[in-house]
Image: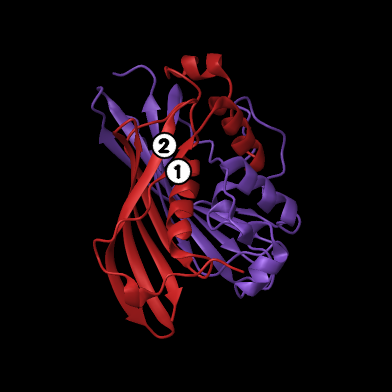
Amino acid sequence: MLLADELKAWIGREAHYPAREELGRASIRYFALAMGDDNPLYVDEAYAKEAGYPSVIAPPTLICETCQYAHRPPDADGYIGHEWHLPVANCRLIRAGNDYEFMRPVLPVDRISVTWTLENIVERSASRGGTQLFVTSVARYRDAAGEVVAINRETLVYQPLTPA
Amino acid sequence: MIKPTRSAATITPGEALPPLERQFTAVDLVAYGAATWDWHRLHYDLEYARSMKLPGVVVDGQAFGALLARAALDWAGPRGFVTRLSFRMKSMAFAGDTLRAEGEVTAVRAFAGGHLVELTQRLTNAGRCVAEATTEIRLPD
């Protein structure tokens, strides 16, 4: 059994990442280029204004996908984004799914802070034998005024590399 | 001249979204990782991926969300706004794979100031399901 009482005690933990700078036009254009998304709303100011926005806007999922909030050296896996560092050894991490809610378009001038909450940990039997952990976390993204602009409920699976 | 935005009056459940295909080459995975400040080895380090018992470097599952949102917004037009996107992973995708986004309208309902359109979307990789999604788009009246 993976799910010791020690692990259950992690449920409810929070981690806050303050905004370090404005999201910025470069981050938006870079993301659109990387995704091969040629929507002019992300790069063409006049087009975005004609469509009713105050400036270019960010692709909706960008702030949920970027680790721009992070500010630390990469860990052994190369990762700089939020991690709980759960005491689970010899597992690989697989994404199970994400539920996004978006309140308004995000602009390049927005300063987005992020608060992660560890919502739940569930142990389920794995088809390949043994058990795996489903860890659900919620990220709330807020603007400079403290208004929530997006919510990301994410479930990751910790799969043992050597099935029991 | 901006692209027109879809009017809810012309949308009925069952309407199919135009399919959108995107290949994720090794270059695309590096570009996506850099653009999202995500330098995790899973997305470019083949030896690392093999040490995790995976056959290749992995397409970041979060990019599936971006692709699904893009397919929905390409269909809805510039004044459409994604209010919800919920996706479930069904299988992994690796460098070189081409993902195809398809979907259809499942519901249209009015609210003060506009309509909400619910879509069911899926991503496939050579016919195999990679992700399933429910997406909600707000359209102005």
- Inspect this view and state whether residue B26 appears: yes
In the picture, measured across the screen, residue B115 lies left or right of residue B32, that is left
- Chain given the colour purple: A
Check disc 1 and report the residue beneath it.
B64
The local secondary structure at tag 2 comes to: strand
User: Pointer 2 indicates a residue of which chain?
Assistant: B
- Inspect this view and state whether residue A94 appears: no
Do the residues under discs 2 and 1 have CB atoms within 8 angstroms? yes
- Chain given the colour red: B
Question: Where does residue A89 sit, x and y in percent of width and height?
Answer: 46, 24
Q: Residue at x 47, y 47 (%)?
A: B67
How many labels were placed on the picture?
2
Nearest the viewer among A19 and A66 is: A66
> Where is A151 relative to A33, above or below?
below
Given this view, does label 2 or label 1 mark the residue nearer the observer?
A: 2
> Where is B53 relative to A158, above or below?
above
Nearest the viewer among B95 and A160 is: B95
Question: Where does residue B53 sit, x and y in percent of width and height?
Answer: 42, 17
Q: Residue at x 33, y 73 (%)?
A: B10
In the picture, measured across the screen, residue B66 lies left or right of residue A51, that is left
* Rendering quarter of residue B45: top right
In the picture, measured across the screen, residue A53 lies left or right of residue A154, that is right
Check disc 2 and report the residue beneath it.
B99
Q: Residues within 10 Å of mark 2 (few under 14, many from 20)?
A: many
Question: Where does residue A52 sit, x and y in percent of width and height?
Answer: 61, 75
